[in-house]
């Protein structure tokens, strides 16, 4: 048997992508009319971000996108998922669009199409215009309405070039890390504001899907990307299984319920009844959030292990900094634990079975709904060798194991259409600043030189062949070993 007969093979047309988001890579925060987002403000609040790092320059993708597209093409990637910066195209969050801002995304999409790479645009990856936060932010209904107007503007401008869209990236983080635990912008710590934000993100998603559908040509695919939690009990006890139910409600079904089924789960309403009566949900809202989707984006990194009591457990926060208010309204008594085994530099356990569990679970509950892994990847402490190269077999092994889980999910009936590795480039990792590197491509932050790591060459080979080669079988392509210097 040849090697290739042993390698799992993915279906023809499977999208092999990498992902980024605007604030994490673009830089150029004050160019061409862009105004501050909540992340610009948060980064300037002392103590919120590692060493007070900011996204001011990030990876300078705004100016270097052509070289970055060449890198992707050189590797053999077939899709690129990027996000549109709301404060770049509609600086105050209302009113007409700024053409210079939209032009950047037009040029980016054109460059991708010319290189044979499918553009996948995310409308919102956490960079709310600061003016909208000043007016109340996501806890206010008006923000959902503004989001739909923004979606229409972007859809009108890019619909002729971009055929795949996702409305929100990880609304759980926007609502519960942004307004609950406060470890993300805007840094508020109010559980009721977090629940209100979750609802207005659900509503904003639904209104934006409608707005996109009327702005986009027929056949355009529209979706949302959720960071779903593969929740497991620490022990088989009934109490720990009850903790799983609570976290599944406020971690997953708070979005899956309205978006895919048109209703909030009754148990979530009961768990949080001591905090709010949910009267901010108006009649017809859950139905408005429930719009037909062409696929569902799943972002997955590590499982979530919970117990009935917090004793001996890590604080109920996902960012690993410890302490502080909980991002889980109605689940104060739940303890969080690290899954056993190897960890990434984020301290997250490596466990691809969680991805299989999510994909096959969704396929069972929502038959006929195509799925896309819109994020998966790992931060490691990469070392640059004296010759400037980076060998990161642990990242390739992480990705390979998760791709094997995707392959098993396909065999088990999940209709998975593509995989987007997080991330194309080392970039601004939110509260961790530039301390954590998720990239396939090393970025030297002093010079902005890009160097594909060994994982990039390995992943490129997988993308070019559609086969899950063993780690270490890199294969090369002209240009793929290139270091792009500033
Ligand atoms: O960097 C983030 C991304 O912005 C959203 N999903 C998780 C990634 C890694 O933490």
Image (cartoon, rainbow, N blue to C red):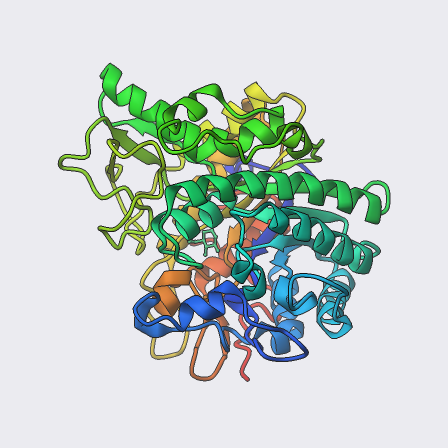
- In the shown orientation, is residue 315 left or right of residue 391? left
151 in relation to 354, above or below: below
Q: For residue 272, which quarter of the picture?
A: top left
- In the shown orientation, is residue 416 left or right of residue 57? right
330 in relation to 242, above or below: below
Point 43% across, 52% down: residue: 178
Point 71% across, 66% down: residue: 105
18 in relation to 252, above or below: below
Image coordinates of residue 117 in percent, x first then y, are: 71, 57
- In the shown orientation, is residue 266 left or right of residue 88? left
Q: For residue 71, which quarter of the picture?
A: bottom right
Point 57% across, 67% down: residue: 480
Q: Nearer the viewer, residue 461 or 106?
A: 106
Quarter of the C terminus within the rendering: bottom right
Point 77% across, 71% down: residue: 99
Image coordinates of residue 103 in percent, x first then y, are: 76, 71
134 in relation to 394, above or below: below
Image coordinates of residue 485 in percent, x first then y, are: 53, 82
Image coordinates of residue 434 in percent, x first then y, are: 38, 69
Q: Is residue 11 visible?
A: yes
Q: Nearer the viewer, residue 26 or 415?
A: 26
């Amino acid at each position: 048997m040849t090697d290739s007969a042993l390698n799992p093979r993915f279906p023809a047309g499977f999208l092999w992508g990498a992902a980024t988001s605007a604030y994490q890579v673009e830089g150029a925060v004050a160019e061409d009319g862009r105004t501050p987002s909540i992340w610009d403000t948060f980064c300037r609040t002392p103590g919120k971000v590692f060493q007070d790092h900011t996204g001011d320059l990030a990876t300078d993708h705004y100016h270097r996108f052509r070289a970055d597209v060449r890198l992707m093409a050189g590797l053999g990637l077939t899709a690129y998922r990027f996000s549109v910066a709301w404060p770049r195209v509609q600086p105050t969050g209302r009113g007409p669009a700024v053409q210079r801002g939209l032009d950047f995304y037009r040029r980016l999409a054109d460059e991708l199409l010319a290189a044979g790479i499918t553009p996948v645009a995310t409308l919102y990856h956490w960079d709310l215009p600061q003016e909208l936060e000043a007016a109340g932010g996501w806890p206010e209904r008006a923000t959902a309405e503004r989001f739909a107007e923004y979606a229409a503007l972007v859809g009108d401008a890019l619909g002729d070039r971009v055929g795949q869209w996702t409305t929100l990236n990880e609304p759980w983080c926007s609502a519960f890390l942004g307004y609950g635990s406060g470890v993300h912008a805007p840094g508020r710590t109010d559980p009721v504001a977090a629940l209100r934000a979750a609802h207005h993100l659900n509503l904003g998603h639904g209104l934006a899907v409608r707005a996109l559908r009327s702005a986009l040509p027929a056949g355009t695919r529209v979706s949302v990307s959720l960071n779903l939690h593969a929740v497991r009990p620490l022990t088989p006890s009934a109490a720990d299984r009850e903790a799983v139910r609570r976290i599944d409600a406020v971690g997953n079904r708070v979005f899956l319920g309205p978006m895919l089924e048109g209703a909030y789960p009754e148990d979530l309403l009961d768990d949080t009844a001591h905090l709010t009566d949910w009267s901010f949900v108006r009649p017809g809202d859950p139905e408005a959030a429930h719009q037909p989707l062409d696929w569902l984006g799943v972002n997955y990194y590590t499982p979530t292990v919970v117990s009935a009591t917090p004793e001996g457990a890590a604080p109920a926060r996902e960012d690993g900094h410890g302490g502080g208010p909980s991002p889980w309204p109605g689940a104060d008594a739940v303890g969080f634990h690290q899954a056993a085994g190897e960890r990434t530099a984020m301290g997250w356990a490596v466990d691809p079975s969680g991805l299989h569990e999510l994909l096959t679970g969704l396929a069972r509950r929502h038959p006929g709904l195509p799925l896309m892994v819109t994020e998966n990847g790992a931060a490691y402490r990469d070392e640059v060798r004296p010759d400037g190269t980076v060998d990161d077999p642990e990242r390739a092994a992480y990705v390979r194991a998760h791709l094997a889980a995707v392959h098993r999910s396909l065999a088990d009936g999940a209709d998975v259409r593509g995989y987007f590795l997080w991330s194309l480039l080392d970039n601004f990792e939110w509260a961790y600043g530039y301390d954590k590197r998720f990239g396939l491509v090393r970025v030297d932050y002093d010079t902005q030189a890009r160097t594909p790591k060994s994982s990039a060459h390995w992943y490129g080979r997988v993308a070019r062949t559609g086969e899950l080669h063993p780690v270490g079988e890199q294969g090369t392509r002209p240009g793929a070993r290139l270091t792009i210097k500033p």
